[in-house]
Image (cartoon, coloured by chain):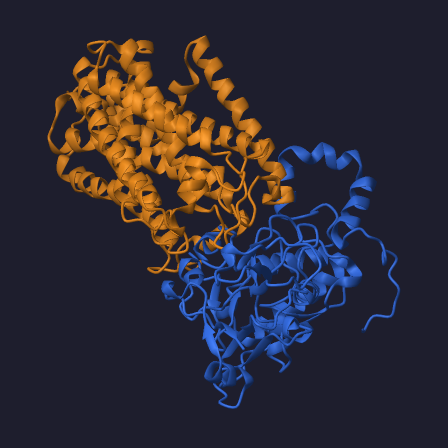
Amino acid sequence: MRAVQERNLATFFIDGIRWNLQGGLSFQIFRVVLLIFMGFGIYAYSFQARYGLEVTGMNDIVSWGFYISNFTFLVGVAAAAVMLILPAYVFHDPDFHRVVIIGEGVAVGALVMCLTFILVDLGGPLQAWHLIPVIGIFNFPSSILAWDVLVLNGYLLLNALVPAYILYSHYKGRKPDERKYRPFVFLSIFWAFSIHMVTAFLYQGLPARPFWNNPLMGPRFLASAFAAGPALITLILAVIHSTTNYKIDRSVFNKLRLIIVISAIINLIMLFSEVFKEFYFPTHHSSSAVYLFFGMDGHDSLVPWIWTSVCVNLLATIVLALNPGKNNPKVLLPACFFLFVAIWMEKGIGLIVPGLIPSPLGEVVDYLPTWVELFVTLGIFALGITVVTWLIRAALIIEERYNTTG
Amino acid sequence: MKSDKPSGRKGCSCTITSAKSDRRSFLKGLSIAAAAGSAALATGCIPDVNAATSEEMKLRWQEFFKDNYRLMTQEEKDATIARLERLAKLQDDLDIQMSNDPPIDRVLYGYAFNITRCEGFMECVSACVKENNLDRKTNTQYIRIFEMEPGNLDPSTGDGQYFHKVPVENKFYMGTQCFHCENAPCTKACPIKATWTEPDGIVVVDYDWCIGCRYCQAACPYYGRRFNWGKPEIPKEEVTTKQHYLGNRIRPKGKMEKCTFCIQRTRTGQLPACVEACPTGSRVFGNLLDPDSEIRFVLKHKKVFRMKEELGTEPKFWFFID
């Protein structure tokens, strides 16, 4: 542990890296496994870079696939950090104050994954500089994708800089000045809603795709995100609680469960409302939903996928709501896991792919990701997990060793 | 045809590009394989770095940093088409003539399709594929022809995959392509203004500015856009060498493309290839601002309708009934 006067911005970063390179054997193995997965991802991407997107399962009809599906879902995970930020900074909830840094770490990791998914989905990644304001051209405000680039990068900055400032203050042994960071916290709360609404508008704003062109899309994105995100954060907190000295109070888990249950129920009500609209009186605008839930013209690859998702979602929500184990983590943690997976299935592939099927000219095809897409995705997930663990590890050590302000 | 010099690879069924890189990789053998690892990324994005001549590298470098077409001065436009012509010669040994003809004053193009006359021969499709240098490997087509049952006017109810003798009794045929909407959802969606409507009404793509995000493709309600999932492959002897920067030049991989009303032809006063090829005279093309044009006659005297009119996209493409 360095003395106070020796600590500066350089040692802040050096210590952060140093702590992450240290660690027990199992921790190192975990790191190496993630590195290997990222290696797989780079190897798979090299095919895509050489031969183009033809090595993916996408085509002119299903022009967005696994990458954009995961991107869409992860925007929700990133936005869900607000469910910790809001009570911690605004309502000064002491329990949440202790874990908010972890939520912010998860948000940064999720955003890094989002931006990487966009980058690997581009046909011309080397031309990505055309998107940078000033040196490129921005079709602002008409293109929602231009908005999305702005809000995602802005949210990444907010979620990286506010915790960095607080941690650095703790590292220096001072109390962070609330007047300095509080405006940015409020900004990041609005921003969290905006990243999700803008990403929903990306789809919602397309009259060409009746399945997406639906005013419920934005609110439903939020509801599902505020269920899936806190479910993931619950799992991460449980891992931290059981593998590190940083103990997390039971009341945090109880409060998170409440947030998850309410969001998951609202999400299911909205799902029911959508399904009702599509199937009570099906029009030609319902064909994507028909394809998704029942298959069409002999193409039904998503039917088992979506029914699995809906059933698992329903069961997990019931378990979390009724709490049969009386707060037994052995019941609640698997329920969180399954809820997370169910929402990933539904809000990823289950939302993006059927929106493109059938084509505007009525043609039905099936989409299956290729090994390249699967491995690139695996690599990006490994990258995201690496980012999250690096940030959280450094943050927790600072909080434990240096935070004298309480 | 300007080039009488017989090319060594002429007649080979291989494509212009793969024939070259196959030989190269054979000669370079293991040295490339060894460098593969991380270099694979770079060579994939900037093809064949190893084999490029310094002139080629310099041209590519200049091409990489060029501006959006709409922001270029006339000198810059001339410079880039000169570079692209030279690169086609260096890379694929093709003698192309690329133009950057601007729109003609007081011209707004419009298109009409006679569903009574069309008999589904698909001559338009083959002419379009040939004229616009469309990828033969994935069989890219801008034009789709749907065989329709009487009683329907929505192509999504028709059969776009028919493969039999035409015309069939009691069926009719409808063609779709990019409709060059006045209120185009695709140009609105593009995050970087790589696609726009020209003053003569043609919706074009700057292939070199496009980043390949495919948002425009998702936004199009008519399935009017095609993506280059891989590098397009065209047999060398079939390449149309009279090209336009915004039109039928061979697209790089990872870029969006679409029907441009054959901009390379129409801006020099010719008809689009599909109109010229149609054996039944079902296709009408002309200047909407000219009161004596055939297209204006059709709009005035025939029963016309447009596809998915409720979306408010205002296509400049009308279907009509005799």
| Quadrant in the picture for residue A272 | top left
- Residue B215 visible? The answer is yes
Residue extending furthest toward the bottom:
B292
Residue B162 vs residue B56, the one in the foreground = B162
- Chain coloured orange here: A
Return the residue nearer the eye: B236 or B123.
Answer: B123
A118 relative position to A190: left or right: right
| Whether residue A219 is situated above or below residue B208 in the rendered picture | above
User: Could you tell me which quadrant the N terminus of chain A lies in?
Assistant: top left
Identity of the residue drawn at 30% across and 9% down:
A330
Left/right of residue A297 with respect to residue A253 in the rendered view? right
Can residue A195 be spotted in the picture? no
Q: Which of A159 and B62 is in front in this view?
A: A159
Give how far across and how far down residue A381 sits, in percent: 45, 29
| Observer-nearest of B27 and A327 | A327
Q: Name the residue at the left extreme.
A: A91
Position of the C terminus of chain A, as image quadrant, is top left
Find residue A266 and report its horizontal and vertical position in percent.
22, 33
The number of discs equals: 0
Looking at the image, the residue that sits furthest to the front is B170
Whole-percent x and y of residue A136? 44, 58
- Chain B rendered in what hue? blue
Q: Where is residue A327 in the image (x, y as percent from the top left)?
A: 21, 11
Relative horizontal placement of residue B105, taking residue A208 as reference (left or right): right
Compared to residue B81, the image places residue B59 above or below, namely: above
Q: In the rendered view, would you say A392 is above or below A129?
A: above
